[in-house]
Image (cartoon, rainbow, N blue to C red):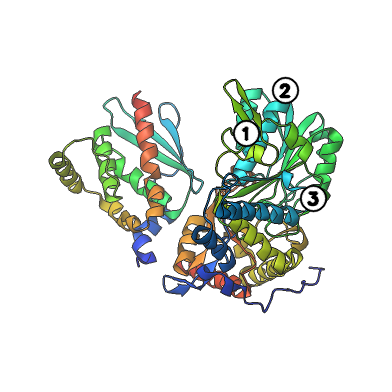
Amino acid sequence: MAVAPPSDPLSGTSLKADFPLLSRTVHGKRIVYLDSAATSQKPDQVLAAMDLYYRNFNANVHRGVYAIAEEATNAIEAAREGVRRFINARSTAEIIFTKNATESLNLVIQSWGRANLSDGDVVVLTHMEHHANIVPWHMLAAEKNLELRWIPLTDDGQLDLTDLDSILVGAKALGATAMSNVLGAFNPVRELTDAARAAGAISIIDGCQSVPHSTTDVQAMGADFLAFSGHKMLGPTGIGVLWGREELLDAMPPFLGGGEMIRDVRLDGFTCNELPWKFEAGTPAIAEIIGLGAAVEYLEALGMDNVRAHERALTEYTLSSFSERFGDDISIHGPADSSLRGGVFSFSFKDLHPHDLSQVLDQHAVCVRAGHHCAKPLMKLLGVGATARASVYIYNDTSDIDSLGDALEQAGAFFAF
Amino acid sequence: MPGLEDLYREIILDHYRNPRNRGELETPPAHRVEGFNPLCGDEIVVYVDLDDAGVVTDIRIGGQGCSISQSSASMMSAAVKGKTTEEVAELTRAFKAMMSIHESSLEGSEAEAAEQEALANVKLGDLEALRGVVKFPVRIKCATLAWNTLAQGIEESNA
C-alpha cells in the first residue's frame, strides 16, 4: 500500500476503562467486542447521566411548571443543542428526536414522500442500502406507483457513479448511505447530493455508520435529510435523530399525531406545533435523549477526527495482519484502501459458514455478527447468503484484532476437512 | 457451559461434508418448495415426490446454509425416504420435541403426556446427534428449517 499507516491519536489511552461491560468475562475469557456496527457499548458517563435523571429529576417535559419538570425539559433541550453542534446544523429546529434511525427514515419517506411524490415518480437508491432505506420505499412505491432505480457497485464494493447523471434523470429523491454497514465503504456524499440537486431531486442520507465514526457537517454535506441512531454512537437504544433542512420540514405534514406535536386542538381539527416538536408526538424518550447528549459530549472530548484516525489505523492493522496471517483463506469484502473505508469488515474465512464461524468465536468470547446484515440485495450481489462481520470502535485496539485472529485459527482447525 | 463438541458431533460434520440426496428433481411430478431463515440468510430448497399412496418416493435438497441446517436436511432426507406422509409427520413431531418444540393439539395434560411418551418412542436414529442443538437456542431454527420446509412441501402436494 502506497499510503503510510496513519498514526493513532488514541493509542495508549485506556478508553476501555470507561466501558464497564468490556471488563466482564464470557465463558471464562475477557470479552472481545467487535460488533459496534450493530450497537456500541456505553461509557460510564452516559449511564451516569441517564441514572441521574431517573434518580434526581424524573418528570415529564414541556408541561410542568415545577422545578424538576423544568430541569428535565432543560436537559433534553441541552442535548438537542449538543446534537446540533455535533453535526453543525443551523438550528435546533432541524433536530428531530425519533426512536431510531429506521423511524427517522420512515418519517421522511412517509411525510415528505406522500406529500411530494405521485404516480410514475422516480426514486434513486444504491445497491448497498440497509433494509431501512429500502423497505419504506417499497411500501410507498406500491401505494404511489413509484419507479425505484439503483446505483450499481464496482467490483471492490464502492458506488459505481459512471452513469449517475443518467440514473438521476427525472428523479425526485435520492436515498443513499454515507457508509456501508457491510462493505465499510465511505460514499462520496457531496458528489451524490450535488448530482441529486442538479437533477432536481432531494437527498436523504443514512448516517448510521458514518456519524459515530467521522466528523459530520450537514451544511457541507449538501443533503436535505440525515438519519442516524443514538445506540451506535455510545448512546442508549430507543433514540434516533432526523436532521432536515428547516424549509422542507416546515412544509411537510406531521408524521405521528398526538400530544406535544400540537399548538391547538379543536373538535373540528388541530394546528401543528412549531419545529422540531411538530414531529415529536407523545412523551419523548427523555432518559435516552439525555444519554445521547452525554454520548455526544464524550465523542466531542475525544475529537471526531481523532476517532476517525484511530479507526483508520486499526483498519490498516486489520487488513495487513489478516492478509499476512491468513492469505487467501480470508476474503474481506469492500475497498482495500483504508482512506476509503471504515472499520467494518465483512469476511469469508475458508469455506466456513458464518454461523458456524461465529459459534466458535463465541467460545473464545469474541463477539462478531453473522448473517445478511439487513442488506439482502447487497448479499445477493456479492453472491453470498451471509457473511461474518467484525466492526471496531474507539475502545478497540490491536489486541482485539489479534484475539479475533487467534479465534479464527481455532475455528479453522476445528472445522478442518 | 456446553462445549462445541456438544453441538458439532462427528456424524453432523459427516453429513455436512457429504450431504445425502443433494440435488434437484424434475417438477412435476416432484414438488419444489423453498424455505428461509430470515435471521441468518440460510435458504433451503426441498424437492419431494409423493406417490398416490402418499409415500415419499424421492427427495432432494438444494440451497445453502450452516453445518447444522445442512446436516439436519441431509439426515432428514435419508430418514423420510420411503415413509408415508403420516410417518413423516410423526417423525417431524418427534424431532421437534427433541428440539423442545411441542406442537401438541391435544388438550389436557394427560393426553398431552401420552403423546409426548409416544413421540419419545419414535426412532430418530442419526438425528439423535442433533440433540445437543437444544443447548444452543439460537441454532434451533437452523436445525428445524428443513423440516418446516418439507412439511410445507407435503401440504402443498396434497392440496
Mark positioned earlier in the residue sequence (2 or 3): 2
Q: Which residue is mark 1?
A: A255
Q: CA distance from mark 2 to mark 3?
A: 28 Å
Can residue A368 be seen?
no
Residue A269 image point, x, y percent: 61, 23
Marks 3/1 in contact by CB < 8 Å: the verdict is no
Mark number for residue A119? Answer: none
Q: Which residue is mark 3?
A: A188
Of the pair B88 and B21, the residue shown nearer to us: B88
Which percent across, then down, holds residue B7? Answer: 36, 60
Q: Chain of mark 2?
A: A
Q: Which mark is residue A120?
A: 2
Residue A300 appears at what percent x and percent y? 71, 64
Of badges 2 and 1, the one in the foreground is 1
Mark 2 vs mark 1, CA separation in Å: 23 Å
Of tags 3 and 1, which is closer to the observer?
1
> Looking at the picture, do discs 2 and 1 lie on one chain?
yes
**Residue that appears at 19% across and 35% down:** B106
- Above or below residue A67? Residue B91 is above
* x 74%, y 50%: residue: A158
